[in-house]
Image (cartoon, rainbow, N blue to C red):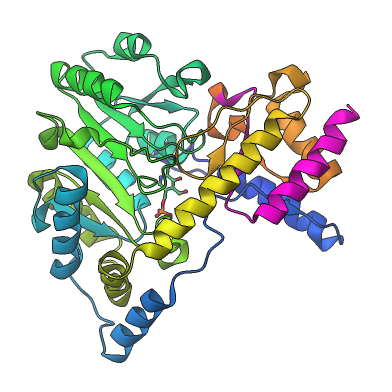
Amino acid sequence: MRFAQRVHHLKAEGAYHVLARAQALEAEGRNIIHLEIGEPDFNTAPHIINAAMTAIQKGLTRYNPPSGILELREIIAGQANKQRGLEVRADNIVISPGAKPNLFFPTLCLVGPGDEVLYPDPGFPTYEAMIQVAGGVPVPVPLLEDKDFSFDLETLEGLLTERTKLIVLNSPSNPTGGVIPREDCERIAELAIRHNCWVLSDEIYSRLTYDGLTAPSIAALPGMADRTIIVDGFSKTYCMTGWRLGFGIMPRELAQQVQLMLTHSIGCTAHFTQYAGIEALTGPQSWVDDMVREYQKRRDLLVEGLNELPGVRCKKPQGAFYAFPNIRASGKTSEELANLILEKAGVALLPGTAFGSRGEGYLRLSYANSQENIREALQRMAEVLRQM
Ligand code: PLP
């Protein structure tokens, strides 16, 4: 079949291939520990589930505004002002089914054929996909291990041209767990203003940071509110991946344009899930804090264990729930080592190359799994790596 040019570059996320192979091994009776998946292993909290059920029983199961219900947008705006230091209102907020549409649609609204878009490599695979579907030119910017997986700012500056339309940032990052420091945000903001380009700041892991650190939002810096789209959602913070609920915060004019895209594509986000979203944001938060503390323990356990493995060294990530160890000293490529660990140790993880060519020499392990499983995975990996 012949498809339109705009979809020629699309490919499945690396995680799906690994998951399929892991499931095939499980079907053969093998025990597999899953460290490849990017979703919380905790369930959605009961009070959130109850809010959705109450909404369904009340008949809140209908079409609703394409940008989402006003009450939820007002709450998101109020919290963004308090927590991120912004000055936004409900009409700056666009609700979507998951965060992904708020990556894709603003990009489609802003990027045209030939426009260049800078994005992190290694980075979340959707960035490259959305740039290509928009007809833009993907310009990967390396994330450097030596800089705790931030950009080298001179490299970033050198890649900016008069065709640059958008810079994509992701802090805390998938797959590295890196957090962009405030000074770097300030410098990137200066560059974006000087080159008159937009910034799409994917902050979906913003609540998952460790050791008391917070990830600053570039949108709060002077001159940035008019050129920044913040993307966030409920999937990671509130363990609601399958509910499909996310949002974007952006200038009003762009929000109106994105709303038109939503009108003609998805129509609207499910009605009752938005009431679950209200409960998530306004209900108790202590369970989220407990979860973050648990992730921090798992991170420490995993990173310490990885650093004891032969041929592996791992920086301590400051956010998200991923470790991104350097495996160059093993003498194997990322893909070879990921396959070997899956086949021999029964531990599913991802090659760094699933996130771009700069991921070569690294693996991504998700610590959204129990301490018990992480310990067992480390032990199994140690046996395989010591025999190499
Ligand atoms: N952005 C990043 C960096 C992610 O890792 C993910 C999910 O893995 C998303 C966006 C998408 O989130 P959602 O499932 O809410 O669409």
- Name the residue: 50% across, 43% down: 2
- Name the residue: 66% across, 35% down: 304
Q: Is residue 295 magenta?
A: no
Magenta segment: 359-388
- Name the residue: 53% across, 28% down: 356
For residue 4, say whether it is visible: yes
In percent of width and height, residue 43 lies at: 51, 68
From the viewer's perspective, is residue 243 above or below residue 364? below
Looking at the image, residue 263 sits to the left or right of residue 362; the answer is left
From the viewer's perspective, is residue 136 above or below residue 74? above
* Residue closer to the observer: 380 or 298: 298
In percent of width and height, residue 6 lies at: 40, 38
* Residue closer to the observer: 347 or 61: 347
For residue 115, say whether it is visible: no
In percent of width and height, residue 168 lies at: 32, 31
In percent of width and height, residue 375 lies at: 73, 48
From the viewer's perspective, is residue 73 above or below residue 185? below
Q: Is residue 360 magenta?
A: yes
Q: Quadrant of the rendered structure where residue 238 is?
A: bottom left
